Amino acid sequence: MCGIAGFLSTGGFAEDEAAHIARRMADALVHRGPDDVGVWVEKATGVALANRRLAVLDLSSAGRQPMVSASGRYVIVFNGEIYNHLELRQSLEASKAEPAWRGHSDTETLLAAIEYWSVTGTLQRSVGMFALAVWDSFRRELWLARDRMGEKPLYYGWRNGVFLFASELNALKAHPAFRTEVDRAALALLLRYNYIPTPYSICRGMRKMPPAHVLRVRAGTSNDVPEPYWSLPEICEQADRNPHSGSDEEVVGALEALLAQSVRGQMLSDVPLGVLLSGGVDSSTVTALMQSQSSRPVRTFTVGFREPDYNEAGYAAAVARHLGTEHTELYVTAQDALDVIPRLPRIYDEPFADSSQIPTFLVAEFARRHVTVALSGDGGDELFGGYNRYLLALRAWRAFGVIPFAARRIVGRALLAASPAGWDAATRWITPFRRPPELGLKLHKLGRRLIEARDLDDFYQSLVTEWTRVPLVDFGSNPRSLIEDRARWPAVREPIARMVALDALTYLPDDILVKVDRAAMHVSLETRAPYLDHRVVEFAARIPVSKKIRSGVTKWPLRQVLYRYVPRVLIVRPKMGFGIPLDAWLRGSLREWAENLLDETRLRREGYFDPRPVRDAWGAHLAGQPNGYRLWSVLMFQAWLEHHAAMAHA
């Protein structure tokens, strides 16, 4: 695992100066790779590549980057892991195409494979997570690529005749050609979704590489249109036409075999390895499959909270005891979580507003004290229909969709008439195993959705949208993300399958994986997600919704795999999520901090937000209306802006 950066200059440069700039860019990523640094510069072609290394496979100097291929044609900087690199080596050896191996790193395997199969051919054969840059010195071309599901980040763009790329915006800022100008369209998207969707970034002119895409750049050109080498929308459409027709037992057996294969491949490491265990279905299944294939107790890590509504540590400990793992847990206080907030603008190098970023960082920081690599359960919800909103959307629309739109709006206003606390008090008679957590808040959200939605797809869009009317002074042309552009949606007939596909294409890479990558890499922890092996993804897409969700139980086939290792009684409970009591904190410990960032005079001076709707939302929140998650996006941008201004004057 590493951080990568570099540039291609059309005007040439002095070699010493270029090496110095590339080193500065790399050093901005030291948290992603504290073990080593490397720079490679070719003055004649104007290219510079830089790398910060977190040594995981082949800890010797044979794994150093930038790495030059055996023939000297290719130079690579690479962030990630290729889990099937030993199989790729065997294929190269069988074809008599292997070089005289210098070490056993997956980086060296990639270079040899690129020499034999080309960049695109190698990407299509690779199983892993990665962002990489490859310089072809024969053709004088720079290739950039990102893994299929978007686990590893990669930014790129042109500035004053210089093509820049890096794992994070922080590294791009170290190049003298870079200028930070806020992209107001991207800011509008942040307010809608609490994250900035690909390909946008907060910096105008800088783009995010889409997952499963490759980009070829030549000096003197400005062609920067990435091309797919694998397509999740096509996978979903093919699955819709040809779903898995096997029995329940066949589906569960095949899923177990694929997941076991993925977990086994991701356990390859030359450094200490563990797993982040929440006690839920996804991480418990990964843990069970790890332990079943390990000759020693697996290291498991859990962070617990004193607030019972947000604490799953006891469930995780019970799973760990049953499986016989070497379990370690840390209980954190509200103050521990609050202390993370001033660090968020540095950890997340562009504004990011999923508040579960805080516990995610805490568990990553805790695990890093003991291991360098940790597996996680990320991706299980998006592949197997695990979010409550899928069933909520379908059931709500079946109940209310037949009602004329005007009448639905009356129902929605009625749901908003009582406060969330009032709804919670009125529904306490419902048994906890059937009553969703934060029911009052969910009923408020339902009311708002009924007022806005005209069809089921509208309803889904409203469930994943916070600010429908963004409170910005100006954001130019209305930006359109994939969620808002139905023409680009996968042609999938089943509504829940369509929602699952859209979440896998948007929410997963742009929220969940960003949250985990930045939190973990800030403390130099490599995380791996076995569910995101593309062979698991392709199989999961073919499982019909009727098998994924059965009798109101989500992730049914995944649960059946888990129940082969862990008793149901340790798992069956309402879905909790990985959150914090944000609304309460904003009225309490965080009130002064938030008030300063949302000060009306400050908002007017900075010129991004219309103060009136922001102040109205803040006032309503202090009065008891749950606006915390909407306001968090405003607060995270304000905190990022303050941090950026401080760094610019440092």
Image: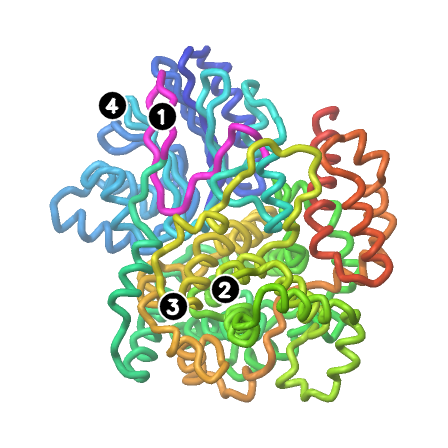
| Disc 3 residue crowd, few under 14, some 14–19, many 20+, Cα 10 Å | few
Nearer the viewer's eye, disc 4 or disc 2?
A: 2
| Range covered by the magenta-colored residues | 202-225
Nearer the viewer's eye, disc 4 or disc 1?
A: 1
Disc 3/disc 4 C-alpha distance (Å): 46 Å
Nearer the viewer's eye, disc 3 or disc 4?
A: 3
Residue at the disc numbered 4: 139
Mark earlier in primary sequence (2, 1): 1
| Disc 4 residue crowd, few under 14, some 14–19, many 20+, Cα 10 Å | few
Nearer the viewer's eye, disc 2 or disc 3?
A: 2
Does the image show residue 388? no
**Can residue 170 be found in the magenta stretch?**
no
Please, what secondary structure does the residue beneath circle 2 have? helix
Residue at the disc numbered 1: 223
* Residue 643 drawn at (x, y percent): 72, 35
Quadrant assignment for the C terminus: top right
Numbered mark located on residue 456 in the image:
2
| Disc 2 residue crowd, few under 14, some 14–19, many 20+, Cα 10 Å | some
Disc 2/disc 1 C-alpha distance (Å): 39 Å
Mark earlier in primary sequence (4, 2): 4
**Can residue 216 be found in the magenta stretch?**
yes
